[in-house]
Image (spheres, rainbow, N blue to C red):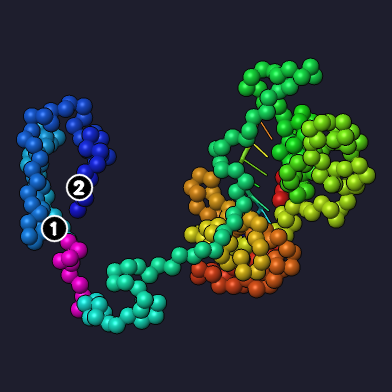
Amino acid sequence: MAVETANQPSKLRWGELDEDDGEDLDFLLPPKQVIGPDDNGIKKLIEYKFNDEGNKIKITTTTRIRKLANARLSKRAVERRSWPKFGDAVHEDVGSHLTMVSTEEIILERPRAPGTKQEEVKVVGDSGQIGKPGAVLMVCRTCGKKGDHWTSKCPYKDLAPPSEGFVDKPASEATTAAANSTKGAYVPPSMRAGAERSGTEMRRRNEENSVRVTNLSEDTREPDLLELFRPFGPVSRVYVAVDQKTSISRGFGFVNFVNREDAERAINKLNGYGYDNLILRVEWAAPRSN
DNA sequence: AATGAGCGC
């Protein structure tokens, strides 16, 4: 039966809404009465209402509250209580729980919490004056370059995200700036004079080692995927495709590995693996269509 | 059966 909610007594509960089609005559009724619970846990609730014909009716609800201490236990359960403790429970105090708390660090790629805003950049004109307050300048999230291109158009969008101090200026400009400036803005080695953007220096984003997992059961979530693939090596991202409207899993997902070999091993081991009553398909993912 | 979101001008 209904549980008494002591909090928020002023708020109407869902079930109490719209009971009387506008005419609120409830104040004419006798107040609710609660009797008990008695020693047997029997509680009576007597309340009065108007029915559809406008007649006063009395409603009596009888519930039995099951008190934990008095709860009926099966004979087997009672018997189990007298068993000597074994395993990890040997060292546990009576009544304390046995839940193991994992201290494993789980890193999921969530760059920014949804809804949080990217730091706004004041518009600065050629004269150096600060522009209209609140105006936001086009700033590429990948390379940080202002006023040049959107992130989606960034020439470096496939590359590793910028590290601290990433400056996308021609090497000459960057060095002269560093040399002339008394504040000495940091110029990363790759940006210093003579430094070449070599392919080896710039790791590609680990999008590359993307593994597609299909035939996932509906209730497989990202943490489950991580748990499943983590043993093969560092995972940079897990993703489960979800129907935006229903938020029900679409039954497939992606796992990105930092190392290609780990991805390959995962594919070999986990493809055809029975997981949650389904047989997983695990294979290399085709690059994103965009 | 199935190939991902965000993210603005």
Q: Chain of mark 1?
A: A
Tell me which residue sits at (24%, 80%) in the image: A82
- Residue A134 visible (yes or no): yes
Q: Residues within 10 Å of mark 2 (few under 14, many from 20)?
A: few
- Residue A12 visible (yes or no): no
Tell me which residue sits at (81%, 44%) in the image: A188
Closer-to-camera residue (A174/A21): A174
State the extent of the magenta-drawn residues as a range: A67-76
Q: Position of residue A159 (x, y in %)?
A: 78, 48
Q: Which residue is mark 2?
A: A4
Tell me which residue sits at (56%, 72%) in the image: A274
Q: Position of residue A38 (x, y in %)?
A: 7, 56
| Residue A240 image-quadrant placement | bottom right
Tell me which residue sits at (66%, 66%) in the image: A233
Quadrant that contains the C terminus of chain A: top right
Q: Residues within 10 Å of mark 1 (few under 14, many from 20)?
A: some
Closer-to-camera residue (A282/A258): A258
| Residue A251 image-quadrant placement | bottom right
Closer-to-camera residue (A89/A52): A89
- Total numbered badges shown on the rendered structure: 2
Q: Residue furthest right?
A: A194
Q: Is residue A191 left or right of residue A286?
A: right
Q: Amino acid at mark 1?
A: Arg
Q: Which residue is mark 1?
A: A64
